Structures are given as structure tokens and as C-alpha cells.
Amino acid sequence: GSRDAKVRFCFQLFDTDTDGFLDREELAMCLSSVFRVTSYRGGLPQPPDELAIATADAMLDACDKTLEGRISYDDFDNWLGNCYTNTEEQLVSDEYQSETVPRETTQIYIPPNTEPVEKSPLRKVNKTARTVANTKSLPTNGLASAAKELELARTLLGLGSGRISVDDVVDVALEAADAAGRIDANAFAKALRRLARLSQVADRQAAATLSQRLFDALSKIDPTPKKSVAAHDLAAGLAVLCPDPVTDRIEAIFALFAPASHAALDANGLQSLLTAIFTFLAAISQSVQSSLTAKPDHLAVSTTEKCFHDLGLDPTAPSLYPRDFALFISKDSSLAARLNF
């Protein structure tokens, strides 16, 4: 998308109370996500979270003329355009780094009373972590076909009526599970019939055919002696088709795969999440399936590696938060389309 669209997306992503302003805490969260990437590349004079707070204070000092402790979108946009920083580049670039050769050093923004430094040349990228960048993009006609196929699936599953929210969908999937968190064929069909009934789906036969196709595909992710599907895999797939805002859907899906008492994922959690979504969407859209140059689980691995690599996060710890992931996919339109975000 355009530079304005990407800046506005980032603003809205961190405007957690949707009041049209960013306060100090929201600014710090936004900037921390950006500075973590810069820190991974080298060149920050202090830890990302500390620099984010200092920069947020500097932004408020410069832009908050009414002393309300918050800034509007216009203030945010103007600050990005006027300050000498690579922050805007990070927010609006299509990838954090698309080349494997070092770029020229550039000066980053340092708040007042901090000595400026130069970024060191970027380290070369691990080619394995970039595998996902080489997957096929959907051509224009492919995007149109995928959109039609996903819309048909959304209708047959009862997710296009607006009567059911992403939280409702997650509840239906989880309630269908047994004590081990698995859904057998009978419970799976009942859960999807329940959604269809709630939304008054007319073509019950087509809905039943789609239900069986989804069960067959999802049951292959983690095979069991008695054919079944993990409840969180079904919930994740259904959630991506919901009409709720992207951030709401991502938060709901993260909650399914995050460790107890955590809101963040490690690499294993994200890999499981992406495997479920890629498998689900490939099962309902031939166009999406054709766009995948690897099996869903393999593509999930490469996408996970790229995500943690680009964001400079520790893959062994729950360090990836929903807003980090939303920011990551916003910079890759092909990936966002393939994930239906």
C-alpha cells in the first residue's frame, strides 16, 4: 500500500483504546517494536524499550502543544516526516530488509541529551530465514479467484452474516473438543452445523461437503489413531475468516497458541498457528493452495524463521506479541493476502 496507508495502519494498530490519539504508553509500544528491529541490526545507544520511552517523551515534547499527554494522527505523521530518523523507513517499508548486502550507514533518531551514533552495516541475512520471500505471489486474477473462494467458504461456514464474532467462533470450536482438546469427526460436523444454523446458511449440503474437506485436511496436521482435529487448529482457521478487525482476529488466535499466562508466542507456537491457518485456507481455496510453493507446515517454518529474524526476537522464548506479528505481516502484502489478513 501507499506510505500514508502504512503509517495510518501502524497508528491504528497501537491506538489500543481507538480514541484517535496515541498516549505515551501507546507511542512507546509502537516505537519499541521498531527499535527492536534496529537493535537486531546494530546501532542503538541503549536498549530498545528504554529508547522507545525516551523517544515517546521527545515526540510528546515536540508535538503535544495542548499538554494533554497524547498526539493525533496528523502529529504522528508530521513527526515521522520531519525528524531525522529511520523510524519512518521501518514503519512503511515493504520488508524490514529485502537485500542480503549491507546498506550504507544512516543516522538514526536519538532523543535530546543522547549522543548520536551511526548504524553499523547490516549483517547478511540467513537464506533459510528468507525462504518465504521466494514463495509465489498471487497474480491479480489469482487474488480475485481466492477472494471469491474465501467469500463462498465464509458464507457456507456462517461467518459472513455479521451475526457471529471471532470470540463466538473460538468458543464454538473449543466447546466441541474433548478433555484432550481434540475434536472427532462427529463433533467437528456438529460444530460447523451449529455455526451454519446460527447464521441461517441456506445450502446445507455444500456446507457439509466443505466441513468434511476441512476435517480431512486439519486432521493430517497432528495425526492420531482415531482421526481427529486439534480444537485450536479449527478455531484458528475459522477466526481468520471472521469479519472482525485484523488486530482482534490476531489477538484471538494468539490466545489459542500462547503458553498459559502469556500473551506472546515462541517460534514453536507461531509455527503451529501458521500451519493451522495455511492448511485451513488451502483446503477451502484452490487459488491459495496454488500460490503455496511448499507444504503448509514447511511454509509455516520458513515464515516463522523470517518473522523472528526480522523482528530480532528470541525464538526460544514467548517474545512475539500480536501487535508485533500484525506489524510484520503489514509489510508483506502477499503474505497478508495468503493469510487472509
Image (cartoon, rainbow, N blue to C red):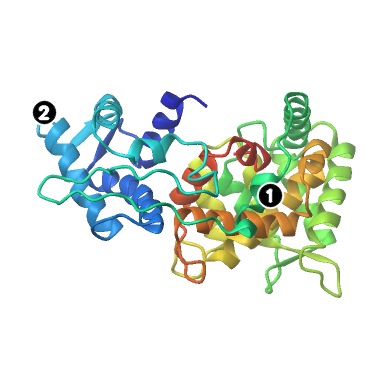
How would you rate the neighbour count of disc 1 (Cα within 10 Å): few for under 14, some for 14-19, many for 20 or more?
many
- Of 76 and 293, the residue lying toward us: 293
Numbered disc 2: secondary structure = loop
Residue 219: image location, x then y, percent:
81, 62
Residue type at tag 1 = Gly
Give the answer, above or below, for where 204 lies relative to 312: above
Residue 161: image location, x then y, percent:
66, 31
Visible in this render: residue 69?
Answer: no
Residue 226: image location, x then y, percent:
86, 72
Q: Residue at x 62, y 52 (%)?
A: 130
Q: Which mark is residue 237?
A: 1
Query: Left or right of 51: which side holds 333?
Result: right
**Residue depth check, mark 1 versus mark 2: number of the one nearer the observer:** 2
- Determine the image quadrant of residue 59: top left
On the rendered image, what quadrant is the C terminus found in? top right
Q: Residue at x 68, y 40 (%)?
A: 338
Give the answer, above or below, for where 100 lies relative to 309: above
Q: How many marks?
A: 2
Numbered disc 1: secondary structure = helix
**Gap between marks 1 and 2 measured at Cα:** 45 Å
- Of 284 and 229, the residue lying toward us: 284
> Which residue matches tag 2?
65
Q: Which mark is residue 259?
A: none
